[in-house]
């Protein structure tokens, strides 16, 4: 018998009395004896786990996540010079996380508004948030929105939006293969597999040129089965920082439409690539402008700094309003048993900012400042390596786009930098430029220099 559950003091312990008064607060009809009778019910039921080995004794230790696990290791390192360039999270020049001023302002407005309550949102989330999110990615004058053929549902940030989209496709789309770029964000294959899709890769990055493998991409998508789903990073490809040019996007679009391939955009960095929300949405808008269908997963983690609020949206652009409305009804059936309905706070922050012209403008200024700081870190790191005469061509540091530099360092070199310099990054050689500051650039440059000259 479990010692805590088997103890029945005659007149009840202090804990019992506290629980009793709590229960009576919630439901005054509960008599004070009810807790001890509940207690005896619990202790009377035989529970196998109480004896001998755990019923979970066979469960194996899982490895840490390849990205979030870097932060776990970083947190354990007592070194004062340690530097976390693993996860894609923005830091200031002082190395501190930021909450945007405009976000603080929106939160203040929300807190001060006594009419706001904490009721459940509808299954599809906050209506204003959904409308404004569609406008943000597709453009204010998007014909698809005007024709009511876009359905947008609020989901748990970018990840949750991808997951809901994957499960919808797994249930309702005729072709269950999704092509994802090689390489891609490590969570993509897992998300799509769990959604019931089978994952194949298309060539994307050419290590020789440290640029786009455009020919390989066209060949692989060209030989994909008709109707296959294709995951595209809307901008700031993770981990490579390599995006197609607009001309290349146009060719990709043409090829995909001619083969009936279904685009699924992952837009996790709108505004972070160029500093302009519109410029970073061009790839998506190009596909929507041709009248064809597509899916888009949006995240506000990076561009509004709302990482932990888990706020994002899935939009499905359909051929007509009737299809869009039926698609939405099925998305609700995906969401309801998954998380029932999404959280209200983060979406309210986003909606408050997006619907107010002044706050929107303030956001774009803060966003541009973040993007610019990242770009300036690229130049500083490039210059520092050049000044040290570090072997190799490091121009990709300034050519790549978005939060990350795909350095080309191998996993041994990364391990060396972590061990000797306390610099934490993913083992594929990706560094989050957003985690770097003017002060830490020299330390990183020293580490890279040592790694490439001492570890091969
Ligand atoms: N898509 C891409 C391409 C992406 O890089 C991330 C996050 C997400 C979606 C999901 O973000 P969410 O927080 O669910 O909105 N990437 C960073 C964080 C992570 O791995 O979770 C990263 O690559 O470091």
Image (cartoon, helix red, strand yellow):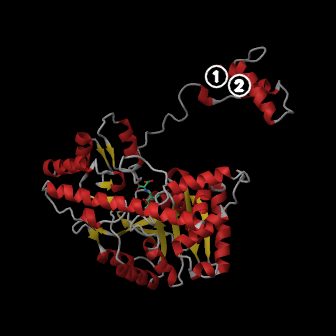
* Label 1: how many Cα within 10 Å (few below 14, some 14–19, many 20+): few
Q: Is residue 274 above or below residue 260?
A: above
Indicate which disc residue 251 carries: none
**CB within 8 Å, label 2 to label 1:** yes
Which secondary structure lies at badge 1? Answer: loop
Q: Does residue 187 appear left or right of residue 124 in this picture?
A: left
Whether residue 343 is visible: no
Q: Residue furthest right?
A: 29
Q: Quadrant of ligand 1?
A: bottom left
Query: In this rendering, would 358 be left or right of 384?
Result: right
Q: Which residue is mark 2?
A: 43
Q: Is residue 148 visible?
A: yes
Choose between 398 and 55: the one closer to the eye.
398
Q: Is residue 167 above or below residue 251?
A: above
Which residue bears the numbered disc 1? Answer: 2
* CA distance separating discs 2 and 1: 8 Å
Residue 294 place in picture, x, y as percent: 52, 75
Q: Please provide percent x and percent y for residue 308.
A: 52, 50
Secondary structure under tag 2 reads helix
Q: Nearer the viewer, residue 351 or 317?
A: 351
Q: Residue 409 or 435: which is nearer the viewer? A: 435
User: Residue 205 versus residue 77: which sits nearer the camera?
Assistant: 77
- Residue 315, horizontal then vertical, whole percent: 57, 70
How many other residues sit within 10 Å of disc 2, few (<14), some (14-19) or many (≥20)? some
Q: Quadrant of residue 421?
A: top left
Query: Within 8 Å of ligand 1, the CB of disc 1?
Result: no
Residue plotted at (34% across, 66% down): 401
* Residue 321, percent from left and from top: 66, 79
* Number of disc labels: 2
Sequence order check, earlier mark of 2 and 1: 1
Q: Is residue 344 left or right of residue 437?
A: right
Residue drawn at the location 38% of the way across and 68% of the way down: 274
């Amino acid at each position: 018998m479990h010692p805590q559950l088997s103890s029945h003091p005659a007149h009840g312990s202090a804990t019992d009395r506290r629980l009793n008064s709590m229960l009576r607060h919630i439901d005054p009809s509960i008599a004070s004896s009810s807790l001890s009778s509940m207690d005896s019910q619990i202790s009377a039921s035989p529970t196998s786990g109480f004896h001998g080995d755990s019923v979970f004794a066979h469960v194996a230790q899982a490895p840490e996540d390849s990205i979030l696990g870097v932060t776990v290791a970083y947190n354990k390192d007592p070194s004062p010079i340690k530097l976390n360039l693993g996860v894609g999270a923005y830091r200031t020049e002082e190395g501190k996380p930021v909450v945007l001023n405009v976000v603080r302002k929106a939160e203040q407005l929300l807190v001060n508004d006594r009419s706001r309550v904490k009721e459940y949102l509808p299954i599809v989330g906050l209506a204003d948030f959904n409308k404004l999110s569609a406008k943000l990615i597709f453009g204010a004058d998007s014909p698809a929105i005007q024709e009511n053929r876009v359905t947008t549902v609020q989901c748990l940030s970018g990840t949750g939006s991808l997951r809901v989209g994957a499960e919808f496709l797994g249930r309702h789309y005729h072709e269950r293969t999704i092509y994802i770029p090689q390489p891609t964000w490590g969570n993509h294959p897992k998300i799509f597999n769990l959604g019931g899709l089978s994952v194949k890769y298309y060539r994307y990055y050419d290590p020789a040129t440290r640029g786009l493998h455009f020919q390989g991409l066209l060949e692989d998508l060209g030989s994909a089965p008709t109707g296959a789903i294709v995951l595209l990073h809307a901008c700031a490809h993770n981990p490579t920082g390599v995006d197609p040019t607009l001309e290349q996007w146009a060719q990709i679009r043409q090829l995909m439409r001619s083969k009936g391939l279904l685009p699924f955009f992952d837009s996790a960095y709108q505004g972070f690539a160029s500093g302009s929300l519109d410029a970073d949405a061009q790839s998506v808008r190009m596909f929507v402008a041709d009248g064809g269908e597509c899916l888009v997963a949006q995240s506000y983690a990076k561009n509004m700094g709302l990482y932990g609020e888990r706020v994002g949206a899935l939009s499905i652009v359909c051929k007509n309003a009737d299809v869009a409305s039926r698609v939405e009804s099925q998305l609700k059936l995906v969401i309801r048993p998954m998380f029932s309905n999404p959280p209200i706070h983060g979406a309210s922050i986003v909606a408050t900012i997006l619907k107010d012209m002044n706050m929107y403008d303030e956001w774009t200024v803060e966003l541009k400042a973040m993007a610019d700081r990242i770009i300036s870190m690229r130049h500083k790191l490039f210059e520092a390596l050049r000044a040290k005469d570090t072997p190799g061509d490091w121009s990709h540091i300034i050519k790549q786009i978005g939060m990350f530099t795909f350095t080309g360092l191998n996993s041994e070199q990364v391990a060396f930098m972590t061990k000797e310099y306390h610099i934490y990054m993913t083992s594929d050689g990706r560094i989050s430029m957003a985690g770097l500051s003017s002060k830490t650039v020299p330390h990183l440059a020293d580490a890279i220099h040592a790694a490439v000259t001492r570890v091969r």
